[in-house]
Every structure is written in structure tokens, then in C-alpha cells.
Image: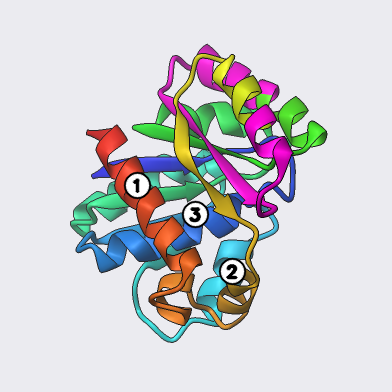
Amino acid sequence: MKTLAFLSQKGGSGKTTLAVHTAVAATEDGERVVIIDTDIQRSATTWSEAREAAAPIVATAAAANLGDVMTAARHDVMTLCIIDTAPHAAPDAARVVRMADLVVIPCRPTAFDLAAAGSAVEIVKAANARAVFVLSACPPRSPEIAETRSVLEGYGLPVAPFEITDRRAFARAVASGRAVTEFETHGKAAEEIRNLWHWLKETMQ
């Protein structure tokens, strides 16, 4: 079972949105996926409660119990575990990243998000974990995108070669317990999410 952890030290980065959308895209690609929601806000859990489809499975757990939940997921022959972490929880975050094959750090093109990205990198490097950046919730054609990408590249971690654009389809899909690949199957948001999943899949290999 491969494990992806979505990590941000700032709320509003798009972390949970990317986690649940990646989980659905991976499920559609044939993976058996479990999302482990360790965020006290329980956003992924709320999303799953509004969802009609049985997959992906969402399990709610404290970070301290993560190992037990992952063991159960392996017993159930899950092939992909996606962990949604809590912001501002450095000790728990360190525990999570040590258990992940790849850590995904979402970052919006704002000064506040860039400041928080440095804290996430410190946690990742202290744990000697593999990590990548994904530019998320990007305004269309914003000059800040290129500037943010340049700063992120300075940390020496891979940066996804595309952006996830701030599109209304994301909010509409999540509100109904779906992902954009289900809500607007052939839309631009769906294309971006599929690109993200395939890139993460290749990076984990």
C-alpha cells in the first residue's frame, strides 16, 4: 500500500480539497483507496457523509492512532492511503510524514502561504521524507503564480509542472459529496485533477 500525505501548516491552502479529489481520481484509476482524516476540522469526513458512492473509504482517526488504521487498511487490501493532516500541528505532522511514501504540500500563490510552506519543508526535511509542492487555488493568469513557483523551487523539492486553478466546480462538487471528475467529467477542473493524480502516481514509483 502506497501512502500520500497532504500537509500544510496553514489553513485554507486547499489541502483537503486536493486530498479528496486525488482519492476519487485514484479510485477511478483502479486503486483501492482509503482516506484517513486526522484533521480536527473533519472536512474530509463531512464530505464523505454527503457522498453517495461507497469509495473511497474515509476513516477518521487521531494522528497517534494512524499506524493501527493503516495496518487495518493493509489487511483490507487497500492499495493507496491518503492522509489529510491538521494545520498547525507540528508534532502530529512529523509523525504523519514519517509514515508517508510521499508528502504533498499545497501552496496558494500568496505571501502567507509561502511563509507557511517553509514550516512544512522543515518538518519534511527533519523526518527525511520525500515531498513535492503543488500550486493550488490559483487565480487564472495571475502573475503571482510564476513568482510563487520560483520561490518554491528554491526549497529544492519538486514542484508540480502545472497548477490547480481556483474554479467554482471544486466547491460545487465538494458540497454534494463528489469530486470534479464526477461533477463535470470533461471539465477543466477534472482534467487538472487527473493530471495531478497521474503525476503523483509517477512520482511515488
Colour option used = rainbow
Q: Position of residue 153 (x, y in %)?
A: 55, 20
Asked if marks 1 and 3 touch (Cβ < 8 Å), the reply is no
Q: Nearer the viewer, mark 2 or mark 1?
A: 2
The residue type indicated by label 1 comes to Met
Taking depth in this image into account, of 38 and 68 the one nearest to the observer is 38
Q: Farthest residue in the bottom direction?
A: 52
Between circles 2 and 3, the one closer to the viewer is 2
Res 19 label: 3
What is the magenta range?
Answer: 118-147
| Tag 2–tag 3 contact (CB < 8 Å) | no
Which residue type carries mark 3? Ala
Regarding residue 100, the answer to whether it shows in the image is no
The residue where tag 1 is placed is 70
Disc 2 or 1, which lies upstream in sequence?
A: 1
- Residue drawn at x 46%, y 54% as measured from the top left: 36
Quadrant containing the N terminus is top left
Residue displayed at 62% across by 78% down: 172
Rendered residue at 51%/29% (across/down): 95
Left or right of 161: which side holds 85?
Answer: right
Is residue 161 in the magenta section? no
What's the amino acid at mark 2? Phe
Location of mark 2 (residue):
170
Q: Secondary structure at mark 2?
A: helix
